[in-house]
Amino acid sequence: MKNILEVKNVSKTYQTKKDEVKALDNVSFRVKEGEFVSIIGPSGCGKSTLLSIITGLEEKTAGEIYIEGELVNNISDKIGYMLQRDCLLEWKTIMDNILFGLEIKEKGKVKQEDKKYAEELLKKYNLYEFKDKYPSELSGGMRQRVALIRTLTIRPKILLLDEAFSALDYQTRIMVTNDIYKILRKEKITAVIVTHDISEAISMSDRILVLSKRPGRVKDIQKIEFDIENRNPINCRESPKFSKYFDTLWKELGID
């Protein structure tokens, strides 16, 4: 598999009235096409800042970002971004919400082929019957699936997820991560996930990037391998290997 994303020597320093605060220091890693990579680390280590830099929403102080080998300095249409909140517009129907990203991208004109693709995704993932309903009529898990489909309609090569499931209750969160993992695998989307949940990172990832305390540096990159047919986050949690990975990462984070 070829590299689709390369983060090279990225640093970020914030200027305050009194001094400078270094959030990230010389962070480098690569992500292969179709790979799932999670980023974990102590609170305040710059995980979300790193995602914002990759997506182009925040400027870096130093370093380079490459997508498919091309140097990127601005917002890229090859990247989709999912946040903790689903950000669905309550006054719009589910279908209108899903097309909203395309309307912005295409400056108000949605192509018929893109609308058809959105409908196909809704049908494929059992949400088509809700297309004329409003977000308030859906469960939290369904809202997150709608948010994902809205992102997929712009056909991103890479999906960045910033604590995308943390607002859900524990049981719903496990089911939604399972659903979204399957969808992303089926659609062959590369994913980079920021999470504070070690279990979530292990269950979803091919590799886990561990950042140090601020300023965030790459402390370790842990490869995650489960000998499981039809792997998904739920059956990974049931594997004997799961607790071993958890203990290793717990120690890496320096949690007592």
Image: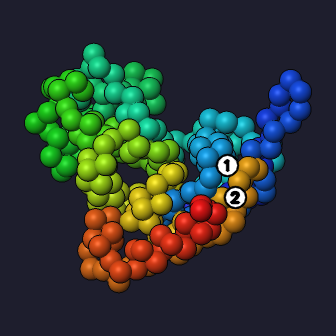
Q: Position of residue 11 (x, y in %)?
A: 78, 49
Q: Viewer-proximal residue, 250 or 231?
A: 250
Q: Position of residue 256 (x, y in %)?
A: 59, 62
Residue shown at the point (70%, 42%) measured from the top left: 73
SS at badge 2:
loop
- Spatial CA distance of label 1 from label 2 is 7 Å
Indicate left or right for 52 with 87 as reference.
right
The residue pinned by badge 2 equals 212
Q: Position of residue 102 (x, y in %)?
A: 39, 32
Badge number at residue 36: none
In the image, residue 35 above or below residue 147 = below
Q: Are marks 1 and 2 in contact (CB under 8 Å)?
A: yes
Indicate left or right for 104 with 123 as reference.
right
Badge number at residue 45: 1
On the question of residue 187 being in view, the answer is: no
From this viewpoint, which residue is outermost toward the left? 129
Q: Position of residue 112 (x, y in %)?
A: 27, 34
In the image, residue 112 above or below residue 216 = above
Query: How dense is the environment of label 1, judged by Cα within 10 Å: few (below 14), some, or many (20 and up)?
Result: many
Q: Viewer-proximal residue, 89 or 69?
A: 89
Indicate left or right for 191 with 121 as reference.
right
For residue 183, which quarter of the picture? Answer: bottom left
Q: The residue under label 2 is which amino acid type?
A: Ser
Q: The residue under label 1 is which amino acid type?
A: Cys
SS at badge 1:
loop
**1 or 2: tag closer to the N-terminus:** 1
On the question of residue 140 being in view, the answer is: yes
For residue 222, which quarter of the picture? Answer: bottom right
Query: How dense is the environment of label 2, judged by Cα within 10 Å: few (below 14), some, or many (20 and up)?
Result: many
